[in-house]
Amino acid sequence: MSNIWIKNPLAILAKDADNGIVISDNKIVELVSQNSEPKLKINEIFDASNSVVLPGLINTHHHFYQTLTRAYPDALNKELFPWLKTLYNVWEHLDSEMIYYSTKLALCELLLTGCTTASDHHYVFSKDLENAIDIQFDVVNELGVRAVLTRGSMSLGQKDGGLPPQSVVQNEKDILEDSIRLIKKYHDNTIGAMNQLALAPCSPFSVSTELMKESAKLAKDYDICLHTHLAETIDEENFCLKKFGMRTVDYLEHTDWLNNKTWLAHGIHFNDDEIKRLGKANVGISHCPTSNMMLASGICRSLELENAGVKIGLGVDGSASNDGSNMILEARMAMYLQRLKYGSSKITHQKALSWATKGSASLFNRDDIGEIEVGKQADLALFKLDEIQFSGSHDPLAALLLCGATKANAVMVNGKWKVKDSKLIDVDLDELIFNHTKQAKRLFFKANNK
């Protein structure tokens, strides 16, 4: 068994590891304190003297397929509901080839920015795309990244009072049967799992109450997590009041979702009482700062939520409401957006980095990733401060966010290097971009030549 010493880091987000860490197989097996040497026999040394070492960043909310519709002309400068209505008419034309390349590009983009575990929320299942999650898991395993994919769903179309067109909604019986199939085929509950699945009805405005309740029952039966969009905009709050006669958190409780296996995307428009209830249930929130700014949705009440007992992590959200999949930049955006609400002294760079690592891991109810500690999985992101924007910086850890790091120098997932010298080891990036661009053009053509 080979022991790798990540030696003498410029800075490291860990205690008592000033002279680095030792990796054996797929785990962290030793922290090396300042002026010390490893106790274990070392087979390989990685010189980290010019690198800031972080736990692998963890993305808790994304829509990989949306990389095909970045900066889409008809969707520009709109708030959430009109933005969605515009893009649903494009996304109904997705096919399996588009899902393959959008998933691969999104995951590679995330890897290059220090992300080692990614969640995706796929909920568009047209008649030609019933195997979308299978395709995504194929890509995940091809790349060797860690993933928590979700079986999303939409069952409430416009004719039933929902937001999406009928072309992208599914029969609820089919949704539930496919959910069970995917759980049995892919979900791994063991420590160090590479493949996990969660159930993710898209939102209160696109699924029925019955589907929400049945999804919660399935999740409990199979001991898996639940995920959905909630309280992203005031429009959504008003929709719930009109459609169900209750606010979003009341609806969450009504459908048996108010528990510690649930994590919510956005979670912006909660009142004080709702925050207490969410905290008591130990619900998780995926804060998506760039998306919230892009769609002018509002600012998540992160500190009040966290102080009440809510778990806080970060998500880049879909690449059509962020237009990028950059996890280290998302941590920077979280720090700055939350400082607008709480002030500079309360939202430190350490706080933002903790949301992107340990906090995000907690949303998946996982304690085997998100930290640099003995026994944790060997998922690491290393950043060099050798670009022009870092010149003159003094605190390396703070400089990552304050000076604006955009890419990792090296990334390890499950004890294996996936990025070195800021390049993907096993992927021809030029070829991937060519094929992904081709699929984006195909989608645009199909959507505009119905």
Image (cartoon, helix red, strand yellow):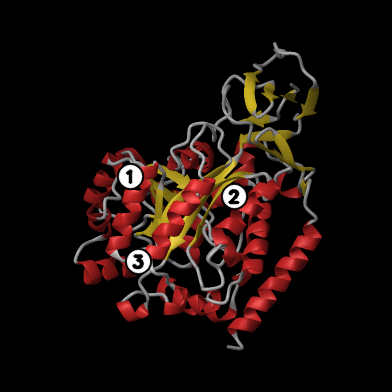
Q: Nearer the viewer, mark 3 or mark 2?
A: 3
Which is nearer the N-term, disc 1 or disc 3? 3
- Find the distance from the CA under tag 3 to the CA under tag 2: 29 Å
Q: Residues within 10 Å of mark 1 (few under 14, many from 20)?
A: some
**In front here: 359 or 361?**
361
Based on the displayed image, in which of its 4 quarters is residue 261 positioned? top left
Q: Which residue is mark 2?
A: 327
Q: Is residue 55 left or right of residue 80?
A: right
Give the SS element for disc 3.
loop
* Residues tagged 1 and 2 counted as in contact (Cβ below 8 A): no
Q: Which residue is mark 1?
A: 304
* Image location (x, y in percent) of residue 158: 36, 79
* Image location (x, y in percent) of residue 305: 34, 45
- Find the distance from the CA under tag 1 to the CA under tag 3: 29 Å
Q: Is residue 202 visible?
A: no
Q: What residue sits 26% from the left and 50% below the top? A: 256
Give the SS element for disc 1.
helix
